[in-house]
């Protein structure tokens, strides 16, 4: 059955839609699937991007050594269940992966996997995404349904609905009545406001949406008369009203249909809060951060700089552990301040025993990083064109430093002078780590002339020549017991 081209194409369409959709919502994402379509069929692995290759030992025990027990347990869980009802299964604890599994009479077993990116606000919308992929596969696969790739298209554009599905589930667990809030229209309103400008300025401030019966419990600073309350669909009017709450603890209050008024009270439990921060913002459910939004779409990132590669390089250096910790903490603070304030900067971490002589403004005496009072000054110095020269003995030796060097094959003309100068300089000074923060937020870690956090084993969606699923016995051929 699984060799049938229509059914393999069904899996491929859903797979490709999932990869594209998750890669837009998060960073570039991989996806994999382990499944058995019927109780009597083999267990198959569909992993064309090799996302599972570092987890063979756990997967071998679960799906190869214990496959008979697994199928027996699934049959028990499906006893007396409706034919098309999807029963969630236990998740696997795999480092760096999010997974969702389900069983049903129409499609016996499936477990979907994708990346757990370290900068996610929440993994819950991604889990809802995988759940929807499971629903579509259990419906499409038994029929060999591949018509015009509809399921793949749905998954490719599922971000708003994935967030809405999670919010609805959480609110249904909390409230003992049917909520009158329509979540998808509210999420569309949040995005529309984020794109609206007032006298050229992006929105600032907070607005929350809560159930009409909760409105009575809110202490308002003031309300708008009932007959004059603007509809939340009047984006331009709501955008103007946001100016009344920007740069304060005040918030606009909505019942999902209109703007009620202004409050400085805490956000009610399970209210939907949109926090506008200029060119981006965050969506929260009460106090729980669910996603960010910018450029007209929702995203999973918390927009905090990822410095995992820098930490690994420092740990691998010959520096003492205490020095490594202090240096990493200091650099992290500088980078986060730069990102928060929206300006780029370049940091040269000089690991040489004899420190480099760099062209720029040399400090006399150098700033001692053990003095916390120097952190604020260091942050200010990063605003000046040129690099900050940081030495391995925890001093700032200079600022406004020029980085030069010979052209290399690893330059990227799309990244600008700051980035490419760092590439050239690093290629000629092996014992340096260069951190480049761009004004539009990406952080690059450059070492030995290469951006080490730029290379990814991610592979694009697979169209045309799609690979076939592999039986579990063949997949683990050669894997030691």
Image (cartoon, rainbow, N blue to C red):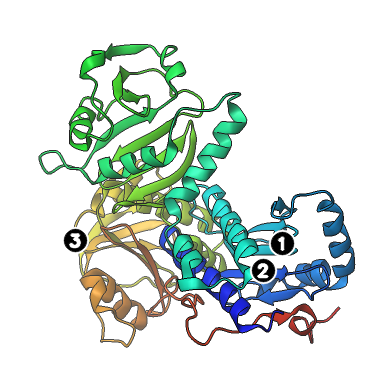
Q: Are marks 1 and 3 in contact (CB under 8 Å)?
A: no
Classify the position of the C terminus by image quarter.
Answer: bottom right
Which residue is located at x 67 percent, y 73 percent?
Answer: 54
- The percent coordinates of residue 198 (x first, y second) are 14, 38
Per the model, the C-alpha gap separating discs 3 and 2 is 61 Å
Q: Do we see residue 27 in this rendering? A: no
Q: How many marks do you count on the picture?
A: 3
In this view, the residue in front, 430 or 106, is 106
**Residue that mark 3 sits on:** 385
- The percent coordinates of residue 371 (x first, y second) are 40, 44
Per the model, the C-alpha gap separating discs 1 and 2 is 7 Å
Per the model, the C-alpha gap separating discs 1 and 3 is 62 Å
Which residue is located at x 61 percent, y 83 percent?
Answer: 5
385 on left or right of 180 = left
Q: Secondary structure at mark 3?
A: loop
Q: Are marks 3 and 2 in contact (CB under 8 Å)?
A: no
**Residue that mark 2 sits on:** 142
In this view, the residue in front, 264 or 62, is 62
Q: Secondary structure at mark 1?
A: loop
Q: Do we see residue 352 in this rendering? A: yes
Q: Which residue is at the far left?
A: 199
Which residue is located at x 66 percent, y 68 percent?
Answer: 142
**Residue that mark 1 sits on:** 106
* Crowding near the residue tagged with mark 1, few <14, some 14–19, many ≥20 C-alpha atoms within 10 Å: many
On the image, which quarter does residue 273 sit in? top left
Which residue is located at x 79 percent, y 86 percent?
Answer: 477
């Amino acid at each position: 059955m699984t060799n049938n081209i229509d059914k393999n194409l069904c899996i491929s369409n859903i797979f490709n839609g999932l990869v594209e959709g998750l890669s837009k919502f998060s960073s570039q994402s991989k996806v994999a699937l382990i499944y058995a379509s019927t109780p009597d069929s083999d267990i198959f692995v569909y992993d064309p991007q090799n996302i599972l290759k570092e987890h063979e030992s756990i997967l071998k025990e679960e799906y190869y050594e214990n496959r008979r027990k697994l199928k027996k347990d699934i049959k028990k869980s499906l006893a007396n269940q409706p034919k098309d009802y999807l029963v969630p299964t236990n998740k696997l604890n795999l480092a760096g992966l999010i997974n969702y599994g389900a069983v049903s009479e129409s499609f016996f077993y499936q477990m979907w996997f994708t990346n757990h990116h370290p900068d996610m606000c929440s993994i819950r919308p991604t889990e809802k995404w995988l759940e929807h992929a499971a629903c579509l596969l259990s419906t499409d696969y038994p029929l060999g349904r591949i018509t015009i790739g509809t399921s793949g298209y749905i998954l490719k554009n599922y971000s708003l609905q994935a967030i809405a599905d999670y919010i609805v589930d959480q609110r249904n667990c909390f409230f003992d009545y049917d909520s009158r809030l329509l979540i998808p229209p509210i999420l569309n309103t949040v995005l529309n406001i984020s794109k609206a400008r007032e006298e050229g300025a992006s929105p600032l401030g907070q607005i929350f949406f809560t159930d009409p019966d909760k409105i009575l419990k809110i202490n308002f600073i003031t309300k708008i008369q009932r007959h004059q309350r603007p509809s939340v669909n009047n984006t331009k009017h709501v955008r103007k009203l946001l100016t009344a709450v920007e740069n304060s603890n005040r918030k606009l209050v909505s019942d999902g249909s209109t703007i009620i008024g202004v409050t400085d009270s805490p956000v009610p439990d399970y209210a939907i809060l949109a926090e506008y921060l200029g060119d981006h913002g965050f969506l929260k459910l009460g106090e729980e951060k669910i996603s960010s939004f910018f450029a007209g779409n929702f995203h999973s990132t918390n927009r905090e700089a990822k410095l995992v590669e820098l930490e690994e390089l420092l740990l691998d250096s010959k520096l003492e552990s205490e020095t490594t910790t202090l240096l990493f903490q200091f650099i992290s603070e500088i980078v986060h301040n730069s990102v928060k304030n929206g300006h780029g900067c370049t940091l040269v971490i000089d690991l040489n025993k004899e420190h480099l002589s760099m062209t720029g403004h040399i400090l006399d005496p150098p700033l001692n990083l053990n003095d916390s009072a120097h952190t604020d000054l260091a942050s200010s110095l990063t605003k000046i064109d040129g690099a900050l020269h940081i030495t391995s003995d925890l001093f700032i030796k200079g600022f406004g430093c020029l980085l030069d060097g010979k052209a290399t094959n690893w330059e990227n003309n799309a990244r600008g002078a700051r980035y490419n100068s760092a590439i050239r300089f690093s290629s000629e000074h092996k014992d340096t780590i260069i951190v480049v923060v761009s004004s539009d937020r990406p952080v690059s870690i450059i070492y030995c002339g290469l951006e080490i956090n730029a290379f990814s084993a991610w592979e694009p969606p697979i169209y045309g020549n799609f690979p076939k699923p592999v039986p579990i016995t063949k997949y683990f051929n050669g894997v030691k017991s």
